[in-house]
Amino acid sequence: MLRLVGIDLPENKRIEVAMRSIYGIGPKISSEILSKAKVDVNTRAGKLTAVEVAKIQKILEEYKVEGDLRKEIRENVQRLKRIGAYRGSRHIMGLPANGQRTRTNARTLRGKRKTIGAMKKEDAAKVAAPEAKK
């Protein structure tokens, strides 16, 4: 199994696609790295030679990926919270930070819907009855 930057890459995928499983590497950076290393983008990850893997690893050291990138992003968010910035307060409340609407959508950050609304008289009486006994 091919391992780059502490991540196991899927062997049956093309190397260009397999490298995207590394945090911080997308389509553009993946193709840049492979062109610098002079590796064919259509090669399967499992078929790479040791020399090609070494070239890719050497070039990957120039990029901030995985743990370093995650740490930097986490520190940036903590800084926003600490200085009391608007974006930091949105992170604290678990709401979108970049001006998206929240009346509808925003489900990724806000979580599953919790319906709050009117009840039928019978249901309200059932809820009120146990409370009255206490």
Image: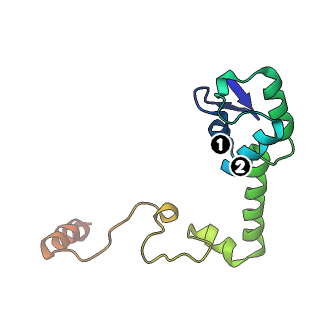
* Residue drawn where x is 86% and y is 41% of the image: 61
Residue 68, percent from left and from top: 80, 47
Q: Quadrant of the C terminus?
A: bottom left
Who is closer to the viewer here, 83 or 28? Answer: 28
Secondary structure type for disc 2: loop
Is disc 2 surrounded by few (<14), some (14 to 19) or many (20+) residues within 10 Å?
some
Q: Amino acid at mark 1?
A: Arg
In the figure, 49 relative to 67: above or below?
above
Q: Quadrant of residue 46?
A: top right
Q: Amino acid at mark 2?
A: Gly
Residue to which mark 1 is pinned: 20
Secondary structure type for disc 1: helix
Residue to which mark 2 is pinned: 24
What is the distance, in whole Å, between disc 2 and disc 1 at their CAs? 8 Å
Q: Is residue 119 left or right of residue 81?
A: left
How many marks the image carries: the answer is 2
In the figure, 121 relative to 33: above or below?
below
Q: Is residue 14 left or right of residue 110?
A: right
Residue 12, percent from left and from top: 58, 27
How is the model colour-coded? rainbow
Residue 120 tag number:
none
Who is closer to the viewer here, 79 or 130? Answer: 79
* Residue at the left extreme of this rendering: 122
Is disc 1 surrounded by few (<14), some (14 to 19) or many (20+) residues within 10 Å?
some
In contact (CB < 8 Å): disc 2 and disc 1: no
Q: Nearer the viewer, mark 2 or mark 1?
A: 1
Q: Quadrant of the N terminus?
A: top right
* Residue drawn where x is 67% and y is 34% of the image: 15
Residue 75, percent from left and from top: 78, 59
